Every structure is written in C-alpha cells, then in structure tokens.
C-alpha cells in the first residue's frame, strides 16, 4: 500500500475553537479546500463521531473470531 494520498488536512486552534482545513485534489482540475470553523463543543462532537466511526470500521474490518472467548 502506498503512503501517498491526494488530500490533506490541517488543524489549528482558533480563539473560539478550532479551524479544520481539508484540501482535496479538485473538481475539473481545480483544487478545493473545505474549511470547518468549529466552536469547542462542535469540535468535541466531531471528535467523538470520528472516534466512534473509526472503532466501528475497525470492528467490521477485523471481526472477532467466534468462540475466541472475547467480548
């Protein structure tokens, strides 16, 4: 698997929360940057949702073997 990607993400603290910039390769050859300006509560909500989604994806990718005794 290559370590290269065609997108970027940058996060910076802002006086009232956090600023997230997501750079995408573009539409019709023009690059696109999505900017999310979140207050602290919105940033926490996003972080919790991303953590939950990554955990769900991990469980789907690597399901526990039946009879392994793990719960």
Image (tube, rainbow, N blue to C red):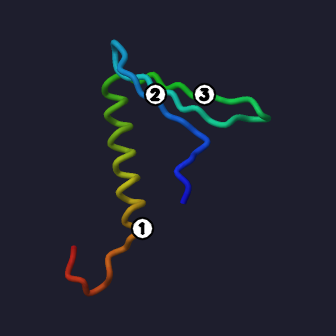
Residue linked to disc 1: 60
The quadrant of the picture occupied by the N terminus is bottom right
The location of residue 69, given as percent across then percent down, is 20, 82
Q: Is residue 31 left or right of residue 16?
A: right
Task: Characterize the local packing of mark 2: few (<14), some (14-19) or many (20 or more) Cα atoms within 10 angstroms.
Answer: some
The circle on residue 20 is: 2
Label 2: state its secondary structure.
Answer: strand
Residue sitting farthest toward the bottom = 67
First reached walking from the N terminus: tag 2 or tag 3:
2
> Could you tell me which residue is drawn at 38 percent across and 62 percent down?
58
> Could you tell me which residue is drawn at 56 percent across and 55 percent down?
2
**Image quarter for residue 34?**
top right
First reached walking from the N terminus: tag 2 or tag 1:
2
Label 1: state its secondary structure.
Answer: helix
Residue linked to disc 3: 33
**Image quarter for residue 33?**
top right
Q: How many marks?
A: 3
Task: Characterize the local packing of mark 3: few (<14), some (14-19) or many (20 or more) Cα atoms within 10 angstroms.
Answer: some
Q: CA distance from mark 3 to mark 1?
A: 30 Å
First reached walking from the N terminus: tag 3 or tag 1:
3
């Amino acid at each position: 698997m290559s370590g290269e990607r065609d997108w970027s993400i940058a996060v910076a603290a802002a006086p009232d929360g956090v600023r997230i910039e997501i750079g995408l390769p573009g539409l019709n050859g023009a690059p696109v940057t999505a900017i999310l300006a979140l207050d602290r509560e919105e940033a926490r909500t996003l972080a919790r949702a991303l953590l939950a989604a990554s955990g769900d994806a991990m469980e789907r990718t690597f399901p526990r073997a039946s009879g392994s005794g793990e719960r």
